Image (spheres, rainbow, N blue to C red):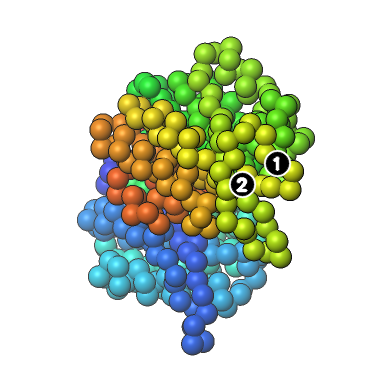
Amino acid sequence: MAKLSVNDLNLQGQRVFTRVDYNVPMEESGGAMVINDDTRIRATLPTLEALRAQGARIVLAAHLGRPKGKRVASMSLRPVADKLAELTGHPVAFADDCVGDAAAAAINNLQDGELLLLENIRYHAGEEANDSAFAEQLAAHADVFVNDAFGAAHRAHASTVGIAEVITARGGQCAAGLLMERELQFLGAELEVPDQPFVVILGGAKVSDKIKVIDRLLEKANTILIGGAMAYTFKLALGKSVGNSLVEPDKVDIAQAALDKAAERGVEFLLPSDNLISQMTNGVWADPEVNDAEDIPDSREGVDIGPATAARYAEAITGAKTILWNGPMGIFEDARFAKGTLAVAKAVAAATVAGAISIIGGGDSVKALNQNGLAEQVTFMSTGGGASLKFLEGKELPGVAVLTDK
Ligand code: ADP
Ligand code: MG
């Protein structure tokens, strides 16, 4: 069911409680907290501009870190208000509590089109508990609710679900922000009936994190390419040796079930035929070697897909019409083990230029694209780690379900 979008509303003079994801990495420097990466703040700018253009009174709410219901000075959102003022070119007011008198006074001061950021909502235990009295307090000075925090939509908290229920019960509207709308479009609608060939690339550390996604995509994909450490659990299911590679021996059954389902449905399911192997001694990795045998020698770890596999995967990606990529092919944090991930990234970028829709879910895959300057060459990069996976599993996210249907 399609959800109301900010663009469907008339917000002139309305107080719009807007949940955003400003959980940005910060570092102490010279006695102050400094923002290391403002990607998440920038990602909300289109929504803020849409609200401002409509003359909304914009009340922003977000969480930072895990203060567990207490005021923790290093987790204050105040530096984010300054950064936001810089990025929008407009003043941004700050209320040093998200509820109560401080919030009420700051909201009452807002004029049409003005911005206010509330202090960290997780300073109150009622947020994560989705406490109904706390949700009422959050809703006390709001006419409309907008959720632009896709990364928090898989959690039923007071600022994602409770407040929406209060506003809905009053007959008010709850809408998706523009970032949220894009996430729902690309991770949802575009993958509902994807253009074929639909190629899915899955990697990263664990099969267990992604098995539900694999299971669902086996019903839609033409080809699934497996890399990263999760490939070794599949190898184990096929009776191969994996040396010291990171594996989940207790997940061999679910790996086998996925292989069976792929065979039954005629989905091409590719595993690495060669690997880079290495060995860690005293915390230091040895230079990798190519292992093109099916088995990985004892005492060695698989750290990346090998060159033949990288070439085979790149070829499988060429000609795809829809691509979903989640998880790196190796321990790409070490440049010596990043070649497989880079080969896949380049192939995805090239296929996109040739007309495919490419959707990247997963923080580390996004990092790999950014590192290689390829971020602009894919169609869409998701901002929500846990939320993306839940959504790709086909689950309804509580923070989306509560929004008003169109
Ligand atoms: P994403 O964030 O894109 O969803 P994950 O978080 O699932 O990806 O996995 C990323 C992590 O997997 C990286 O830290 C990477 O080092 C690790 N990884 C990939 N391949 C291997 C491997 N062969 N052995 C151990 N770790 C691996
Ligand atoms: Mg990750």
Q: Is residue 366 visible?
A: no
Instruction: Say left or right for 319 vs 279.
Output: left
Q: Quadrant of residue 211?
A: top right
Relative height, residue 49 to residue 378 (above, below): below
Q: Which residue sits furthest left? A: 53
| Residue at mark 2 to residue at mark 1: CA–CA distance | 9 Å
Q: Which residue appears at 49% of the width and 87% of the height?
A: 30
> Residue 222: x percent and y percent?
45, 20
Q: Looking at mark 1, is its residue's CB closer than 8 Å to ligand 1?
A: no
Relative height, residue 287 to residue 183 (above, below): below
> Residue 245: x percent and y percent?
68, 44
Answer few, some or many: residues within 10 Å of disc 2's Cα (few below 14, many 20 plus, some between 14 and 19). Answer: many
Query: The N terminus lies in which quarter of the figure?
Result: top left
Viewer-nearest residue: 221 or 26 = 221
Instruction: Say left or right for 234 vs 59.
Output: right
Q: What residue is shown with label 2?
A: 277
**At label 2, which amino acid type do we have?**
Ile
Q: Which residue sits furthest bottom? A: 30
Answer few, some or many: residues within 10 Å of disc 1's Cα (few below 14, many 20 plus, some between 14 and 19). Answer: some
> Residue 287: x percent and y percent?
57, 56
Q: Earlier in the sequence, mark 2 or mark 1?
A: 2
Q: Which residue appears at 44% of the width and 72% of the height?
A: 35
Q: Which residue appears at 51% of the width and 18% of the height?
A: 267
Q: Which residue appears at 27% of the width and 47% of the height?
A: 10
Label placed on residue 367: none
Relative height, residue 328 to residue 392 (above, below): below
Q: What residue is shown with label 1?
A: 297
Q: Cβ–Cβ below 8 Å for labels 2 and 1?
A: yes
Q: Looking at mark 2, is its residue's CB closer than 8 Å to ligand 1?
A: no
Secondary structure under badge 2?
A: strand
Relative height, residue 304 to residue 195 (above, below): below
**At label 1, which amino acid type do we have?**
Pro
